[in-house]
Amino acid sequence: MKTDEIIRLSIYIITEYYRNNLEPFFEYVSDDIIWIGPAKGQLLRGRENLIRTFAAEKHSLTFTMGDIKVLCVSPHTHVKEVLLHYDIYTHYPSGNTFRHDQHLHYTWREKKIKTADGLTQYRSRIVCLHISNAWPYDSRDTIYPVHYENVSEQMRIPAQQEHYITVKASDGCTHRINASGILYIATVKHSSKLLLHTQSGTLTVNGTLSGFEQQYPSLFLRIHSGYLVNPCHAKSIRRFALTLSDGTELPIPEKRYTQVKKLLWQSPARLS
């Protein structure tokens, strides 16, 4: 049971879940799953019971996820506890949107599974899923907060193109971050660390600028040996510096200035 694979699966399952695609979730659910929440007092036991409950659920809701922070611990060789923290935006047919600060806890366990050819293998399965900060649902709701807009204040969020990156940070967590919220990435001298500056704060992450540049060529622009910037946040350019949307000013080497300026003007997110 590899930690990176379990984290990847945990993120994939929940992002598909909020796209109203439940198949990945049901694929990895154990027969003796325990589901706690999100409705207050809700506890469901067993995979078949869970599938029946979701099959009876009727709603017209859509969802948008915010950035995800993931912490994984291993209390036993065959067990992984994966904790996710993220914002979830629920969109109602009326046009209203509501934000909820969500905590999700998976318990993964390696279990003996009989394959189609009758062999027994160990496979990772979700034996418990706990949504710890339950929604104050209307009593008419089953799984989803269909009537939640009757008791909550609405909010609206601008539509954003979703490009996510996943990084390991020095806080021991894995972070799934919307690239639109990243301002720039800077090297940390004499280390293999980077400072990832976002609109909500700064993370120290593992990696190299060259690695990010190669992996996300359409998202970041190299303006300096020590900086990658998100062109969406480039506000103005002058000899020899670039100013970002939050007021941060980054240097541009003279020999790179003309090329950087040209690339910024050619970018879909042009300078304002």
Image (tube, rainbow, N blue to C red):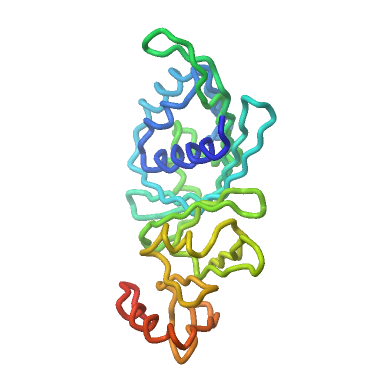
Q: Where is residue 118 in the image (x, y as percent from the top left)?
A: 41, 7
Q: Residue at x 46, y 20 (%)?
A: 47
Q: Quadrant of the N terminus?
A: top right
Q: Is residue 272 visible?
A: no
Q: Nearer the viewer, residue 195 or 53?
A: 195
Q: Residue at horizontal 44%, vertical 40%?
A: 12
Q: Which residue lies furthest to the bottom in this view?
A: 239
Going by the image, does 67 lie left or right of 107? left
Q: Which quarter shows the C terminus? A: bottom left
Would you place residue 43 above or below residue 189 in this image? Answer: above
Q: Relative to 109, is 153 above or below?
A: below
Point out residue 49 in the picture as x, y percentages from the top left corner: 45, 19
- Quadrant for residue 186, please give it: bottom right
Q: Where is residue 60 in the image (x, y as percent from the top left)?
A: 33, 42
Give the image location of residue 113, x and y in percent: 48, 15
Q: Which of 31 and 257 is in front in this view?
A: 257
Q: Which of 80 and 149 is in front in this view?
A: 80
**Residue 1, placed above or below residue 85:** above
Residue at image x 41%, y 60%?
Answer: 216
Q: Residue at x 45, y 12 (%)?
A: 114
Q: Quick check: can you spot residue 155?
A: yes
